[in-house]
Each structure stands twice: as structure tokens, then as C-alpha cells.
């Protein structure tokens, strides 16, 4: 199976993401993806090509480049910023109030959905995404209606927690699951496969 994942994580104060490709030890399944690097003492994810990014635009470029050859599964777990500050010329003056104008960024997931559904080698790609917030269930339903195969909705109380409650939304309805993040990941894969 060709798997594509992207994920943003804070690593020493910066966001990171990587596209990766590798073959399993048996030489069978090929995995392609975009994802964040969990930094634990400087270690990177084994068996993958790690590419550090510094901006939402870098992640967009990496993701769209990685899917050009298609994939069977796309996991969008990144909390990518919706906005970027407008660039200004020169130095920002000090000792006075200022306003920063925020400009909207393109929605990477929308672009991926369009690209994968229009590519003959990826028309049947399974797409999973995550939605966080008080209105996550409502937004998850809209995402499923737009073509996302599975959306994992969760509240802010799950952030940083070892266990949590999640709503797994698909075209067949919503399943409430709870447990560790590893157990929840297993439930997501069970529904995607």
C-alpha cells in the first residue's frame, strides 16, 4: 500500500514536517508520506526520508509534490496555520501599538482531495483527517460530505493527554471511541482498511 501522511509538530519552538518514502523489510509495501518529526533527543523517524519544513507553504509544496505519483491512503494529521502575517518592508517600530494583518493560507487538505480524486492512480485513495475544537463533530460531518473518508473529531481536552474520547466520522455515521492514541489509531486503520 502507498501511504501518505503529513503532520506538524512543535520541535524546539519550530514546526516540522517531512515527506517520506520507504519499503518495508520484505520489500513489499511502499509507503509515501508527509509527517512531522517527533524529536526525542534529536532522533528522527527511522526508515523514512525526513524533510524539515519551516512554513505552511513549505508543507503545502512537500505534500503536493509527494502526492503527484498518487497514494492509496492519505492521513492529514497536521494542525497547519490558517493564516500568515502580512510581510511589511523595513523594521517594525518599537514603543507603540501596532496591528498585524493576517492573510489566509490555502487549505492543503482541499487541494489534496481534489488532486487525489482526479488522479486515475489515486481515485480510490482513502483520506483521513482530524478536526479539533468545540464544533469538531459538526465540521467533521461537512468534511465527510466533501469527500473525506474518515474524520477523527476531538476536543481540546485530548491535547497532550495519554487517553481520550474521539468521534470517528464516515459516510456510514459516527463511532465514538476511547482509549490511548495508539488504540485510537488502530480503530482509524481498521475503518480505513
Image (cartoon, helix red, strand yellow):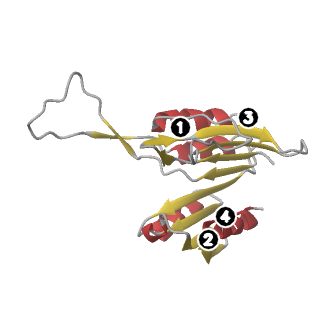
Where is residue 119, by image quadrant?
top right
Residue holding disc 1: 59
Q: Are marks 2 and 4 in contact (CB under 8 Å)?
A: no
Q: Residue 101 location, x and y as percent? A: 25, 39
Helix, strand or loop at disc 1?
A: helix
CA gap, disc 4 to disc 1?
Answer: 23 Å
Horizontally, residue 19 falls left or right of residue 52, namely right
Q: What residue lies at 63% left-to-right and 32% top-to-bottom?
A: 65
Q: Nearer the viewer, mark 4 or mark 1?
A: 4
Residue holding disc 4: 185
First of labels 4, 1 by sequence position = 1
Mark 2 crowdedness (10 Å alpha carbons): few <14, some 14-19, many ≥20: some
Horizontally, residue 52 falls left or right of residue 193, namely left
First of labels 3, 1 by sequence position = 1
Q: Residue 124 location, x and y as percent? A: 75, 51
For the C terminus, the image quarter is bottom right
Q: Nearer the viewer, mark 2 or mark 4?
A: 2
Helix, strand or loop at disc 2?
A: strand
Q: Is residue 192 visible in this depiction of the protein?
A: yes
Q: Nearer the viewer, mark 1 or mark 2?
A: 2
CA gap, disc 2 to disc 3?
Answer: 33 Å
First of labels 4, 3 by sequence position = 3
Q: What residue lies at 66% left-to-right and 60% top-to-bottom?
A: 149
Residue holding disc 3: 69
Where 100 sits versus 179, above or below?
Answer: above
Q: Residue 192 location, x and y as percent? A: 73, 62
Q: Nearer the viewer, mark 3 or mark 1?
A: 1
Q: What residue lies at 46% left-to-right and 39% top-to-bottom?
A: 56
Helix, strand or loop at disc 4?
A: helix
Where is residue 167, by image quadrant?
bottom right
Q: Residue 16 location, x and y as percent? A: 52, 41
Amino acid at each position: 500500500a502507498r501511504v501518505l501522511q503529513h503532520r506538524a509538530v512543535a520541535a524546539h519552538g519550530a514546526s516540522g514536517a517531512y515527506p517520506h518514502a520507504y519499503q518495508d523489510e520484505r520489500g513489499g509495501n511502499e509507503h509515501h508520506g508527509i509527517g512531522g518529526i517527533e524529536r526525542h533527543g534529536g532522533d528522527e523517524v527511522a526508515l523514512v526520508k525526513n524533510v524539515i519544513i519551516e512554513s505552511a507553504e513549505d508543507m503545502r509544496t512537500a505534500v503536493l509534490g509527494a502526492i503527484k505519483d498518487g497514494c492509496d491512503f492519505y492521513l492529514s494529521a497536521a494542525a497547519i496555520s490558517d493564516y500568515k502575517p502580512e510581510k511589511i518592508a523595513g523594521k517594525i517600530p518599537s514603543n507603540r501599538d501596532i496591528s498585524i494583518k493576517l492573510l489566509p493560507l490555502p487549505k492543503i487538505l482541499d487541494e489534496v482531495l481534489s488532486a487525489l480524486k482526479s488522479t486515475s492512480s489515486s481515485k480510490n485513495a482513502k483520506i483521513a483527517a482530524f478536526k479539533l475544537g468545540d464544533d469538531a463533530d459538526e465540521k467533521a460531518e461537512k468534511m465527510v460530505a466533501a469527500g473525506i473518508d474518515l474524520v477523527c473529531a476531538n476536543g481540546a481536552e485530548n491535547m497532550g493527554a495519554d487517553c481520550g474520547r474521539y468521534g470517528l466520522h464516515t459516510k456510514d455515521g459516527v463511532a465514538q471511541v476511547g482509549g490511548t492514541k495508539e488504540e485510537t489509531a488502530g480503530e482509524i486503520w481498521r475503518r480505513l482498511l
